[in-house]
Amino acid sequence: MRQSRISDSEIQGFNWKILKYVFPYLVEHKTRIAIAISFMVFAKLASVSIPIILKNIVDGLELSNNEPAAIIALPIGLLVAYGGFRLANVLFGEIRDLLFGRVTERTIRRISLKVFQHLHNLDLDFHLERKTGGLARDIERGTSGFNFLMRFMVFNIVPTLIEIGLIIGILLYNFEIGFAIIVFISVFVYVGFSALATEWRIKFIREANQADSSSNNQAIDSLLNYETTKYFSNEEYEANRYDVELEKWELAKRKNRLSLFALNGGQALIISIAITAMLILAAKNVINGSITLGDFVLINAYIMQLFLPLNFLGFVYREIKGSLANIEQLFGLLKVKPKINEDKDAKDLILRSGAISFENVSFSYNEKREIVKDVSFEIRAGEKLAIVGPSGHGKSTLVKLLFRFYDVSQGSIYRWAKHKKCNIEVSS
């Protein structure tokens, strides 16, 4: 049987495999991406330089002893450099995003087109079984998930890791080992907690997505059949069915929100403890004279610069996991194989006379019930053939077979007639 959705047993191992589908699209824009990466590196170098400049400014002010002449003598270049590096950090980041935006948009366009074409290549059974509303939501969330994945995976997680590495290196080189130990433990605990908590709450994201698709599908199906609903005065019945789906959505969103609260609260606790420990150690060193007040400002600035991106990294990680959950069904659609496949050596169908011939055609939608049994007839150019019979006996099925919405179980359909005697037998 065809698989129209990814099973739960496949999801855990499938998530990160999605990334291999992204890579070929990135390679197509390697020059643009290389330039964007260069600006990313420039932005991060400017970012880690700002606290160093700030330290020198503070130390200079401290040595001046609040004397106006000394303040004026403070190297103006440091102040100008401080503003310049802050501007460079923001500007380089904006240029990076601008360059990579086109890569993201082009990728989303190509993937959306690929899914659209693939859906048109699938057979009729798939479209009869799938609900239009749920299918539309799967595609919408999938493309949105790709947008987030492309932008944040490439140019937020990697730069954040680079920045964290640079800051840890500077702290290790300039200050006592205690700062490095606090940073290492806090980063290790933070990343471990974020990963475990995010994996735990993914199931709530999936539940919310499924409930969202179901409620959306219920609403669209009901509105598409507006006349039937009015004929039978079923407005209240349809509203109750829709409300049942909305209740499931509400419950799923509540679980999702509570799990997010637990994740954010745990991350905030880890960061607060680490920052407090770092500042206490820095203040102690200032009091005993091992570091200057400028060093204290430097450490404080780096703490903020370390944990803000780390906190952002936690946000990006869980959002990426959520995006991967959102695009699971999109790739599930691409994995669906159509039942109707063209032979590799098939020739183009060229109609000349317009004749049609069914020869010993049999067909069944399932093994339990054969709809068409050993049907043979032909229609020559200009002729008309009427097929009559009770509903459900295969009249419309013959037309579907002619248009190859389904392949016949036995027999053949030709585009020419051999002038045989008509023999039509449609079983119930």
Image: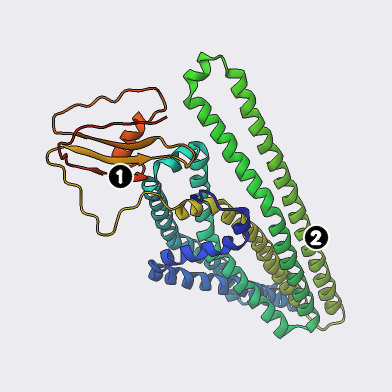
294, above or below 428, in the image:
below
Residue 203 spot, x, y in % from top left: 68, 51
Residue 411 - label: 1
Real-space CA distance between mark 1 and mark 2, rounded to the nearest whole angstrom: 71 Å
- Whether residue 40 sits left or right of residue 356 in the image: it is right
Left or right: 230 with respect to 108? right
Pointer 2 residue: 269
Q: Amino acid at mark 2?
A: Leu
Question: Which of the 4 image quarters holds residue 48?
Answer: bottom right
Depth order, front residue of 123/400 = 400
Q: Nearer the viewer, mark 1 or mark 2?
A: 1
Q: Is residue 80 visible?
A: no
In this view of the protein, which residue sits in the foreground, 62 or 91? 91
What colour scheme does the image use?
rainbow
Residue beneath the point at 87% across and 81% down: 288
Q: Which of these two is toward me, 240 or 31?
A: 240
Q: Which amino acid, mark 1?
A: Gly
Where is residue 138? Give x, y as percent: 52, 45
* Marked residue nearer the N-terminal end (1 or 2): 2
Tell me: residue 26, above or below residue 69. Answer: above
Dividing the image into 4 quarters, which one contains the C terminus? top left
Residue at 41% from the left image edge and 39% from the top image edge? 364
In this picture, residue 47 sits left or right of residue 144: right
Could one spot residue 163 in this view of the protein? Answer: yes
Answer yes or no: do the residues labelled 1 and 2 have beta carbons within 8 Å? no
